[in-house]
Amino acid sequence: MSQKQFDDLRKLHSTFEYRKYEMRTEDGELFIRFRFSIPGLRDFMPEWRFPLGDREVSVNDPILKSLVFSLGLVETISYYKTVCPEKVVIKCGSLTAAQKDWWRKLYYNGLGEFLYRNGITVSRDRLVRFECTTTTEEAVTLHDERSYSGCLVPVGGGKDSVVSLELLKGEDITTYVVNENATATNVIEKCSHKKGVYTAKRTLDPQVIRMNEEGYMNGHIPISAVFAFSSVIAAYLTGFKYIALSNETSANESTVPGTNINHQYSKSFEFEEDFDEYLSALTDSDIHYFSLLRPFTEVQIAGVFAHRGSDYFSVFRSCNRGSKKGIWCCGCPKCLFVYIILSPFLDEKKLTEIFGEKLLDKESLDEDFRELTGLDENKPFECVGTRSEVLSCLTDYIKKGNKSRLTDRYEKEILAFEAAPVSGLLGEWCDDNCVPEEFKPRLKEALAELS
């Protein structure tokens, strides 16, 4: 991809249309279909299905309609990025000026990695503008008198969601998954204290896959933002008060140093705050979206996982490539990162047992190792922790007398960073969080167990 292709496609296709959303109830589910179009090129009809639970649902419910409309807006990003039109025309709803700014920010920051990796330079103001066929000057906050309780816990199947499940033991928790995969299923089955399992289904329009194959633009989208809007619909349909994410403070670090380009933008605290602000303007429903692990760093999560999560050692998988099959691919930066971040807390025998091989001996992971440690400029475009955490864990590994091909090769450079000792990192606490006060003692108790 290139700047020229970006510019040429925008000239040919200047408009993206969000035409409508349709809802109906069938077979105990809420069925949603969106209709998008790049006029003269392709039409798209992605779909969602949400189990309804025991609550009565009306497709004319104004709060539900507002939430579904918003889910459609975030879904547009997957299709918009194929040609990146200058204008998104919304024909089935309206946005205030402030809301248009909100969506411009999400598009720009959420597509930051996409633009960077495709060699595209464009300002936030020029990337996209939103036009609505109906106008509104002020947002109307819809009143919700219903009561909510319990926790909906999104589960991807990695160590982070395991830690959240364990920290919430004793609470009324139900797991939340979008599209079942082997890893999430295996972790959920191990969680004996859950009260239920809620699974939504998201279906991409196959036209977008065909466009990728035909050479139209492709790349990373802020998928966690899509899941955020979907989780609120799930909570609204089933009556859950808390949506407890498992995003840590380490997710705030940029992937490309000196920029705002962050693979994990929609997992960052900045997005979490923005999302809460946007949601509160839609409805006063007593639904709270927050990350339970935001006060923690990745190394602290690894410590809590090693201490409390032994039942999950055989089933958790923090590997995007292998998650659908429930395996570690052992060839990606995410696998290597998890191996490193767990190394202060689990011995090499246990690590090798979990992963199936000693990842720090793999020549094929040399480049990933350099990127994770900061020896190369950019971090891997994966959900990984900070460079300083990685260096602390590797320094700990070396000073304990452990040997491996990669640490031996770069020992001098690693030790030259004089990274903070892991023991000093375990007591940290990030105050930039939205964790309800009632849950904070659980987090602090878990940290105290590590000291």
Image (cartoon, rainbow, N blue to C red):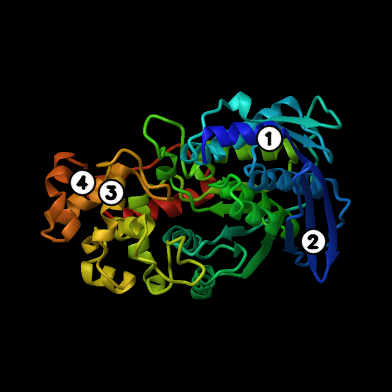
Mark 3–mark 2 distance (CA, rounded to whole Å): 44 Å
Mark 2–mark 1 distance (CA, rounded to whole Å): 29 Å
Q: Tell me, yes or no, whether the two marked residues, 2 and 4, touch with CB atoms within 8 Å.
A: no
Residue 333 at x, y percent in the picture: 36, 55
**Quick one: label 3, few (<14), some, or many (20+) residues within 10 Å?**
many
Mark 3 element type: helix
Residue sitting at 53 percent across and 33 percent down?
3
Closer mark to the observer between disc 2 and disc 4: 2
Q: What's the residue type where badge 2 is placed?
A: Phe
Residue sitting at 78 percent across and 41 percent down?
39
Mark 2 element type: strand
Q: Is residue 449 visible?
A: no
Judge by depth and name the residue closer to the eye, 271 or 411.
Answer: 411
Residue underneath mark 1 = 85
Which mark sits nearer the N-terminus, 1 or 3?
Answer: 1
Q: Is residue 387 visible?
A: yes
Residue 197 at x, y percent in the picture: 62, 69
The quarter holding residue 196 reads bottom right
Closer mark to the observer between disc 2 and disc 1: 1
**Quick one: label 1, few (<14), some, or many (20+) residues within 10 Å?**
many
What is the number of the mark on residue 97?
Answer: none
Residue 189 at x, y percent in the picture: 53, 75
Q: Tell me, yes or no, whether the two marked residues, 4 and 3, touch with CB atoms within 8 Å.
A: no
Judge by depth and name the residue closer to the eye, 189 or 47.
Answer: 47
Q: Tell me, yes or no, whether the two marked residues, 3 and 2, touch with CB atoms within 8 Å.
A: no
On screen, residue 110 above or below 447 = above
Residue underneath mark 3 = 390
Residue underneath mark 4 = 421
Judge by depth and name the residue closer to the eye, 348 or 447.
Answer: 348
The quarter holding residue 92 reads top right
